[in-house]
């Protein structure tokens, strides 16, 4: 089944709010923001440019397992770099391919150097489920003779 839609379609549904951190912030501050906002990742920005993504996964694998402390470790020390980004015109399939091949769960959306949003694996799964549901309803209508075309 072909999956239709673009990153822009997802952003129109979920919104464009995105939370950021800097490489100079402590991991403790960043994790605190994630907890406060109930999110799993922050986009790291430096001088107005997206430079990476910090996820809960980075924290558990690069701080906890290495015996570092979140109050002393800087985001820049554990940041997944470079940021794998997408544009708002990119397809859902491209996002899925990037996440799979790079084993990541979050993609910053950047157009013309401006951060527009963040797309997660959960956003993509929801989009695919919605698309499948729509296709099934169309097929059921066609089979039952209710399909207008």
Image: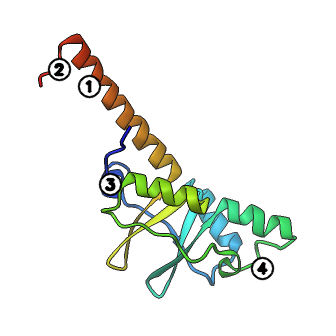
Distance from disc 3 to disc 2, alpha carbons, whole Å, reads 26 Å
Nearest the camera: 115 or 85? 85
Residue 146 makes an appearance in the image: yes
User: Residue 114: which disc?
Assistant: none
Query: Which residue occupies the extreme right position in the image?
Result: 67
Up-down relation of residue 31 to residue 15 (above or below): below
Q: Quadrant of the N terminus?
A: top left
Residue, disc 3: 6
Q: Judge the density around disc 3: few (<14), some (14-19), many (≥20) Cα neighbours within 10 Å.
A: some
Q: Do the residues labelled 1 and 2 touch (CB within 8 Å)?
A: yes
Q: Which quarter of the picture shows residue 54?
A: bottom right
Residue 102: x %, y % from top left:
59, 63
Q: Quadrant of the C terminus?
A: top left
First of labels 4, 3 by sequence position: 3
Q: Do the residues labelled 1 and 3 touch (CB within 8 Å)?
A: no
User: Residue 147: which disc?
Assistant: 2
Residue, disc 1: 138
Q: Do the residues labelled 3 and 2 touch (CB within 8 Å)?
A: no
Nearest the camera: 62 or 71? 62
Looking at the rendered structure, the secondary structure element under dot 4 is loop
> Mark 3 or mark 2: which is in front?
2
Name the residue located 40 percent from the left edge and 43 percent from the top edge. 127
Distance from disc 4 to disc 3, alpha carbons, whole Å, reads 40 Å
Q: Which quarter of the picture shows residue 23?
A: bottom right
Residue, disc 4: 72
Distance from disc 2 to disc 4, alpha carbons, whole Å, reads 62 Å
Nearest the camera: 117 or 32? 117
- Left or right: residue 60 versus residue 37 is right
Up-down relation of residue 6 to residue 84 (above or below): above
Looking at the rendered structure, the secondary structure element under dot 3 is loop
């Amino acid at each position: 089944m072909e999956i239709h839609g673009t990153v822009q379609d997802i952003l129109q549904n979920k919104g464009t709010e995105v939370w950021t951190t800097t490489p100079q912030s402590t991991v403790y501050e960043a994790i605190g923001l994630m907890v406060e906002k109930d999110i799993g990742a922050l986009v790291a920005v430096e001088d107005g440019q997206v430079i990476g993504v910090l996820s809960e996964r980075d924290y558990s694998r690069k701080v906890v397992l290495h015996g570092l402390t979140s109050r002393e470790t800087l985001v820049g020390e554990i940041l997944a770099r470079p940021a794998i980004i997408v544009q708002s015109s990119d397809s859902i399939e491209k996002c899925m391919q990037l996440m799979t091949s790079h084993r990541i769960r979050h993609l910053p959306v950047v157009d013309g150097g401006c951060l527009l949003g963040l797309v997660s694996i959960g956003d993509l799964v929801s989009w695919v489920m919605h698309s499948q549901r729509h296709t099934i309803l169309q097929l059921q209508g066609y089979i039952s003779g209710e399909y207008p075309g």
